[in-house]
Image: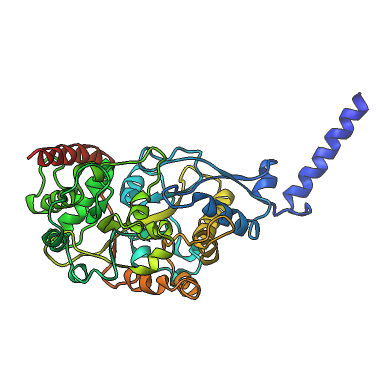
Amino acid sequence: MRNSTACQKGFLVFISFLLMFGIMPNASYSYAAATDQPTVINVALYDYVPDPERFQQAVVKNWAEVEPNVRLNFVKWDGYEADPDANVDVFVFDAIFLSHFVDKGYLKAIPQNQIQDRQDIIDFAMEGCTVNGAAYCIPQIVCTNLLFYREDDTALASVRSVPDLYRILGERQSTGVIPDNNEGLLIDMSGGTTKAAMYLDALLDTRQQYTDYTVLPDPNTLNSKAFKSLKQLQKMGGKDQIEYWPDNNDAYIRADWFRSGIGRAFIGYTEAMSSMGDYADDVNFKTISMSSKTDIPVFYGDMVGVNSAITDPAKQDIAIKLANVITASQTMVDAISPNEAKVYPQYLLPARHSIYEKMQQQFPIYSQLIPIATHPDNKIFKMGPDARNWIEQAKVTITDRLATVAVQ
């Protein structure tokens, strides 16, 4: 035992000598080797898309080509409900919470020179990722409400605002959840956060000036002109319909109703067309102002961020590399294109120019989406550091006020 111990000590001294002078073979080693554990990155994708599974498959496929030895562990996290904990390494979130996350220190700043194909990213989307001059995320998708109407409805072709639409549709006459054929407005206002965001959107159009809402308005005192638009939306849709949420959680059920002839107009996101099937080719769509004034086009942004809780530099680099893969052109084309199970694209609005160029070759609707997504006046919809507290208060105020309107 004694001689064996002596040999071991001698061997350790020899190894220390090699390390000291940098002559150990493979002296530059990976994060996985340094920790003696396989590298695993916990990643939370954005679930509020028509087919989240297609996104996960696209990320897995494209990541394997970049880092086949780094395993991805997909976790559930909802940025609307909670802040990210330290175990969510890379996560996709709504830009309305960007300032809040930065203020709380949840996001690592991403150097501009580490954002791949930066010139391909739509300018306003990249600008929406910055706080005080630093980029804290990479844009993946932009999203805004559009007015959908049937091709032969010439009256709605002239609509430019919610008040315009109300003058044509008026109050819904049928009762219950589902309107009559070609009557009323289909719109989902069932969520409190949705109502609060719609109010801020209407306030931008009312005041005719974009703001990132660094300082949010009093959540208990509503601007009467901005709130009027929400009242008109409720009257056109009917309270039962705008508040309806299906038991099967089908977020695009109203698009399916519209396809079958129900409702005269539909307000929703572009991805709702994935539920319209071929009928999407017979539908027109456009942005509209939430007030009687000119539309200030604001877009929700799905952004990919890296958790500041990652302190190891090597793992930080891997996480940033993953953020780039999630937002990359090929990954997004794979994610939104049809596959064997789904015959229609997801019709989302990617944050990169090249994706539209690829998609429109097979799906002509994307040629109509390009000018909407790349309009020079577009801005990312953001809220200030107090976003979460403000939403919790505002959604109560707005819901209560709309309930009062309903009984008048």
Q: How many marks?
A: 0
User: Is residue 131 visible in the rendered structure shown here?
Assistant: no
- Nearer the observer, 221 or 35: 221
Q: Position of residue 380 (x, y in %)?
A: 30, 60
Is residue 33 or residue 340 the one in the foreground? 340
Query: Which image quarter: residue 147?
Result: bottom left
Where does the C terminus fall, quadrant-wise? top left
Please provide percent x and percent y for residue 46.
44, 49
Is residue 30 depicted above or below 219 in this figure? below
Q: In the figure, is residue 270 to the left or right of 333?
A: left
Which residue is painted at 68% across and 41% down in the image?
A: 37
Scheme by which the image is coloured: rainbow
Name the residue nearer the viewer: 191 or 178.
Answer: 178
In this view of the protein, which residue sits in the foreground, 70 or 308? 70
Q: Quadrant of the N terminus?
A: top right
Q: Is residue 191 left or right of residue 20?
A: left
Image x and y of residue 364, in percent: 43, 74
Depicted 260 relative to depicted 247: above or below: below
User: Where is residue 15 drawn, in percent x and y?
Assistant: 80, 44
Q: Is residue 281 above or below residue 214?
A: below
Q: Identify which residue is drawn at 40% across, 41% down.
A: 249
Where is residue 208, by image quadrant?
Answer: bottom left
| Residue at far front of view | 181
Is any part of residue 178 visible from this angle?
A: yes
User: Which residue lies most toward the top here?
Assistant: 1
Residue at 20% x, 61% y is: 210
